[in-house]
Image (cartoon, rainbow, N blue to C red):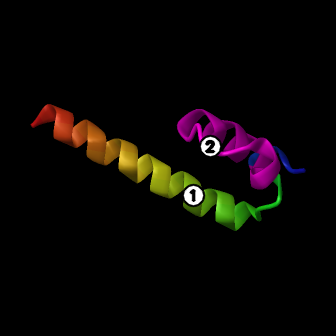
Amino acid sequence: MSHDKAMYIEWLLLMDSLESRESLKDKTIEELQAKFNLCRLKQLDEEMEEVQ
């Protein structure tokens, strides 16, 4: 497993408590990047709502 893929898996495990390491290991790096981006956008939306 590449270092980048391992990093995405670790971040996603922290960001989404419903994910499991095993299910993430089966995904491609592109799928992990897309999921990470969606989680990050959701976090940013929540932060923006808190500011308002």
The residue lying furthest to the front in this view is 18
- Quadrant in which the C terminus is drawn: top left
The residues colored magenta run 5-24
Residue at which label 2 appears:
12
Q: Position of residue 18 (x, y in %)?
A: 60, 43
Residue 15: quarter of image: top right
The residue lying furthest to the right in this view is 1
Residue 48: mark: none
Residue at x 28% of width, y 47% of height: 45
Three-letter code for the amino acid on which mark 1 is drawn: Lys
Q: Give the secondary structure at mark 1.
A: helix
Three-letter code for the amino acid on which mark 2 is drawn: Leu
Q: Residues within 10 Å of mark 2 (few under 14, many from 20)?
A: many
Q: Main secondary structure of the magenta part?
A: helix
Q: Residues within 10 Å of mark 1 (few under 14, many from 20)?
A: some
Q: Position of residue 47 (x, y in %)?
A: 27, 37
Residue at x 38% of width, y 49% of height: 42
Left or right: residue 1 versus residue 43 is: right
Is 7 part of what is drawn in magenta? Answer: yes
Residue 35: mark: 1
Q: Are marks 2 and 1 in contact (CB under 8 Å)?
A: yes
